Structures are given as C-alpha cells and as structure tokens.
Image (cartoon, rainbow, N blue to C red):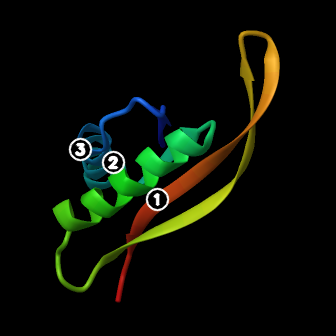
Amino acid sequence: MEILKVASSSNPNSVAGAIAGAIESDGIVEAHTIGAGAVNQAVKAVAIARRLLDKGEENLKVIPGFIDLEIEGEEKTGIKFVINMEQG
C-alpha cells in the first residue's frame, strides 16, 4: 500500500492524481497529514480523486483515523485517511 504525505502546501490536484493512480494500481492508498491545513488539502484531493475515478457503480471509501508520527525526533499526532474503492 502506498503512503502519501500531504502538507498544507500540497496541490490538491496533484495529490488527487496520486490517489487515483494508487487506487488503480493497488486498490488502496493511505494519506498522512499533520495540521488543519494538510487535512483540508487531503479532503479536497479526495473529492477531486472521486471525480477522476468515477466509474458508475463504484465509489471511494475513506476511513479517517489518528496516527502517531515521528518528525525530526519528535512524536506528533496526525490524521490518516485510508482510501479504497467500494462496490455498489
């Protein structure tokens, strides 16, 4: 499973393309964020990816959750989004 790191400065269109590509190849992807700005960009990217992957009967399924990450030796709590395709 591919893990995407999304920052507040990330371009939602670029992240959406990465999400769509990972979904098409692996069927699942995780996006990791730290901070409100990064969460905002990730949510916009998921909405754009949903449009890119629109195939009628399938839809994106997103499961948010907390994650502990180590950044420069410091423990930080972030939010992860597990994204995959859902039938029906």
Please tell me whether mark 3 or mark 2 is closer to you in this view.
Answer: 3
Amino acid carrying label 1: it is Ile
User: Residue 77, relative to residue 39: is it above or below?
Assistant: above
Residue 72, given in percent of the width and then of the height, sits at 72, 10
Q: In this orientation, which residue lies closer to the viewer: 85 or 47?
A: 47
Q: Which mark is residue 65?
A: none
Q: Position of residue 75 (x, y in %)?
A: 82, 25
Q: What element carries label 3?
A: helix
The residue drawn where x is 59% and y is 45% is 36
The reply to whether discs 1 and 2 touch (Cβ–Cβ < 8 Å) is yes
Expressed as whole percent of the image width and height from the top left, the position of residue 87 reads 36, 82
- Pointer 1 local density, CA inside 10 Å: few below 14, some 14–19, many at least 20: many
**Residue 59 sits in which quadrant?**
bottom left
- Name which of mark 3 and mark 2 comes first in the sequence: 3
Q: Residue at (17%, 75%) from the top-left corner?
A: 55
Q: What residue type is labelled 2?
A: Ile
Relative to residue 32, is residue 86 drawn left or right?
left
**Image mark for residue 13:** 3
Which residue is label 2 attached to? 19
Of discs 3 and 1, which sits in the foreground?
Answer: 3
* Residue at the front extreme of this rendering: 37
